């Protein structure tokens, strides 16, 4: 379990981290479908034309470890109800739709590329920038349908083709092989589809490198990160995590200390409490928000993603990693999580196309697994980092400016009153959302 003093650590909503075989008894159920019990944004309601059904979701199967010590993905799949995207379309068309439990939809039910680009001030950059840049996605196990599903997503939304044939997409093992790949896993395949689609949505002109680790151990995922960098990626997204440990500082040096590379890591989905590798001082830790349209000048509004005391964006004070020089908050003597944030609430989730181990079609996903590749893609739009830089520092130079949307409402749990910002949003820096969300690319360049 997560080793934190947070009062929220006593119950973890079925999401286990680096634990023994006691959790593996649920694996068969998870691999067969949804695993954990469905979560909801509120008590279910009978849908009518004027009362949309409340959104329900469940952790993706890779949120349950196969083996003791495995890290797990940070994602949820919507199983029913009416998402924010559907509500907004209903307001435009007068027709209310909802997600059918455990079934794929024929058309998207979550936010797509134009929504995300508009929400984060990236429409112009997404159109003009990103060519020549490669975003690496690091996950465990193989998704045999990764290339085909990615093509479905990009074709539907009118994004440029990104295929093996045209050199835009490449899938390799942690050793760099294109033929000797890990065993297939339908749960991690869902995660890979989510990550690939989010990188595409925000940076459609970028090339994509999918690096599949042999297993979900830190050693194998770390080797996959190193391989991604060795193959030339300067932007590496990681949507997984686990409990902190005394080994983390050595993992920092072995796997995440890559100057000139923007490495993003999801902050976790269990509410207040730090996890690794989000707590590495060499990465950009990415928290999660609930994203909705609004009548503001921006046209969008965000708050901390929090469903319950044990489900929401991660944040907190690392027990092991030292504080990077660019962090100046005073309530945590070591590394504070998060740095920045982006959409993660499943109720305001993102559209994903997936077909391996599930009915082929459109699904809506949430979790900080969505926010990490979004931010990796923003870094890619901003351009190649300086060769000696650790790009996690870049947003701190733009703190308090219009380059970041300051998220000031919501919390993800209970923390010390003397350092309430670690779990509660406020003006300026806070743990759950960091310095805020992107407004263009200016906060993500050196």
Image (cartoon, rainbow, N blue to C red):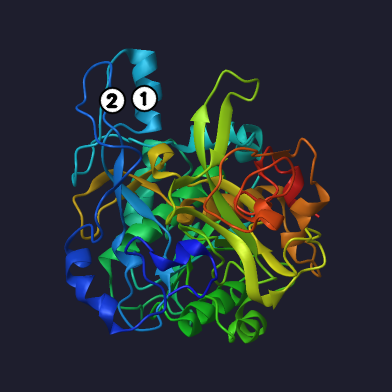
Which residue position holds label 2? 52
Relative depth, front residue between 356 and 435:
435
| Residue holding disc 1 | 87
Say whether residue 246 is left or right of residue 140: right
Q: Is residue 59 left or right of residue 9?
A: left
Q: Position of residue 419 (x, y in %)?
A: 69, 56
The image quadrant where one finds the C terminus is bottom right
- Residue 377 x %, y %: 59, 51
Residue 216 shown left or right of residue 45 in the figure = right
Kindly state the secondary structure of the residue where label 1 is placed.
Answer: helix
Q: CA distance from mark 1 to mark 2?
A: 8 Å
Which residue sits at x=55%, y=72%? 276
Q: Is residue 20 visible?
A: yes
Q: Count up the numbered dots.
A: 2
Q: Residues within 10 Å of mark 1 (few under 14, many from 20)?
A: many
Where, quadrant-wise, is the N terminus in this rendering? Answer: bottom left
């Amino acid at each position: 379990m997560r080793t934190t003093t947070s009062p929220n650590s006593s119950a973890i909503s079925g999401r286990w981290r680096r634990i023994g075989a006691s959790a593996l008894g649920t694996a068969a159920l998870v691999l067969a479908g949804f695993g954990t019990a469905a979560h909801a944004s509120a008590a279910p309601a009978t849908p009518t034309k004027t009362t949309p059904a409340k959104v329900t979701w469940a952790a993706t199967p890779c949120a349950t470890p196969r083996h003791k010590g495995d890290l797990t993905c940070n994602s949820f799949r919507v199983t029913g109800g009416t998402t924010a995207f559907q509500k907004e379309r209903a307001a435009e068309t007068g027709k209310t739709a909802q997600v059918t439990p455990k079934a794929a939809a024929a058309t998207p039910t979550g936010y797509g590329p134009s929504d995300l680009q508009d929400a984060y001030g990236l429409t112009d950059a997404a159109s003009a920038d990103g060519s020549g840049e490669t975003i690496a996605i690091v996950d465990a196990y193989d998704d045999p349908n990764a290339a085909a599903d990615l093509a479905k997503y990009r074709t539907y939304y009118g994004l440029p083709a990104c295929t093996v044939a045209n050199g835009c997409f490449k899938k390799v093992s942690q050793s760099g092989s294109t033929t000797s790949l890990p065993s297939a896993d339908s749960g991690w395949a869902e995660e890979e589809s989510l990550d690939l689609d989010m990188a595409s949505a925000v940076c459609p002109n970028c090339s994509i490198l999918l690096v599949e680790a042999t297993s979900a151990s830190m050693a194998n995922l770390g080797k996959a990160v190193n391989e991604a960098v060795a193959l030339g990626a300067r932007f590496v997204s990681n949507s997984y995590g686990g409990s902190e440990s005394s080994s983390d500082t050595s993992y920092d040096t072995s796997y995440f200390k890559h100057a000139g590379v923007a490495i993003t890591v999801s902050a976790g989905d269990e509410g207040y409490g730090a996890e690794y590798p989000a707590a590495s001082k060499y990465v950009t830790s990415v928290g999660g928000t609930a994203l909705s349209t609004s009548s503001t000048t921006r046209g969008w509004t965000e708050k901390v993603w929090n469903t319950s005391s044990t489900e929401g964006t991660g944040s907190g004070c690392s027990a092991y990693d030292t504080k990077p020089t660019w962090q100046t908050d005073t309530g945590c003597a070591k590394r504070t999580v998060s740095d920045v944030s982006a959409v993660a609430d499943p109720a305001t989730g993102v559209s994903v196309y997936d077909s391996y181990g599930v009915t082929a079609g459109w699904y809506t996903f949430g979790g900080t697994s969505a926010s990490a590749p979004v931010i990796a893609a923003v870094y890619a739009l901003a351009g190649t980092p300086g060769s000696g830089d650790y790009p996690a520092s870049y947003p701190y130079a733009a703190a308090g400016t219009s380059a970041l949307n300051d998220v000031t409402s919501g919390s993800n749990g209970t923390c010390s009153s003397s350092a309430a910002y670690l779990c509660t949003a406020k003006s300026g820096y806070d743990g759950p959302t960091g310095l805020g969300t992107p407004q263009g690319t200016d906060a993500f360049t050196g």
